[in-house]
Amino acid sequence: MLQPIIQEQTTGCGIASAAVLLGHSYAQMKAIANAMGIFAEDESLWSDTHYVRRLLATGDLVVSPTEQPFESWLALPDLALLAIKYHVECGRPFWHWVVFERTGPDMRVLDSASYLPANVRTDFDAMQPRWYIEVRQLAEVESDGIQ
């Protein structure tokens, strides 16, 4: 099971979510991101999936090429990056990244927000995902014969 990582910057949810999925600490993922020219303070990071995709490409992960609309919790793949708290300001979309994980019948969301009483969430009715990006391990994809 994945472990939650708490974002150390107000706008570091993408970095924290990538850290969860890649098995890094927040500091390690932030250093990798900064070396790639990705900074949590960059407002374009808040409304573009390209940056988090670049971060995830640094590991043995394969992500779906497009975002899929959220339909239901049961319809999600076993591992996904979810966009919640979606809203538009001045014509520009913003969201908060979280990680969805299913192990057998158990589902949970790892939310990096530092203000939460618990960062492993199962209060699914309180979260309203807009869309998701499926995440798979490279070895899993290769064993399926799909590349």
Image: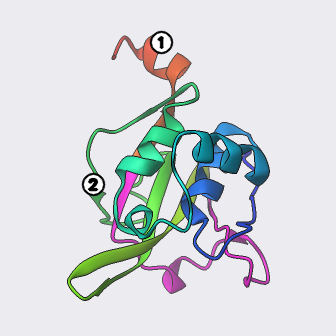
| Crowd band around label 1 with a 10 angstrom C-alpha radius: few (<14), some (14–19), many (20+) | few
Residue 51, given in percent of the width and then of the height, sits at: 43, 49
- Please name the residue shown 73% across and 82% down the image: 116
The quarter in which the N terminus is drawn is top right
Residue 145 lies left or right of residue 90; in this view the side is right
- Please name the residue shown 58% across and 28% down the image: 59
* Residue 106 visible here: no
Camera-nearest label, 1 or 2: 2
Q: Which residue is mark 1?
A: 143
Q: Earlier in the sequence, mark 1 or mark 2?
A: 2
- 14 relative to 102, above or below: below
Stretch of the chain drawn in magenta: 106-133
- 61 relative to 115, above or below: above
Residue 94 lies in quadrant:
bottom left
Q: Which SS class for mark 2? A: strand
Residue type pointed to by label 2 = Gln
Residue 82, given in percent of the width and then of the height, sits at: 45, 61
Q: Which residue is mark 2?
A: 68
Residue 113 counted in the magenta span: yes
Residue 50, given in percent of the width and then of the height, sits at: 36, 48
- Please name the residue shown 20% across and 83% down the image: 91
- 85 relative to 102, above or below: below
The quarter in which the C terminus is drawn is top left
Residue 3 lies left or right of residue 50; in this view the side is right
| Crowd band around label 2 with a 10 angstrom C-alpha radius: few (<14), some (14–19), many (20+) | some
Residue type pointed to by label 1 = Ser
Residue 85 lies in quadrant:
bottom left
Q: Which mark is residue 72?
A: none
Residue 34 counted in the magenta span: no
Q: Nearer the viewer, residue 123 or 89?
A: 89
Residue 83 lies left or right of residue 25; in this view the side is left
* Residue 21 visible here: yes
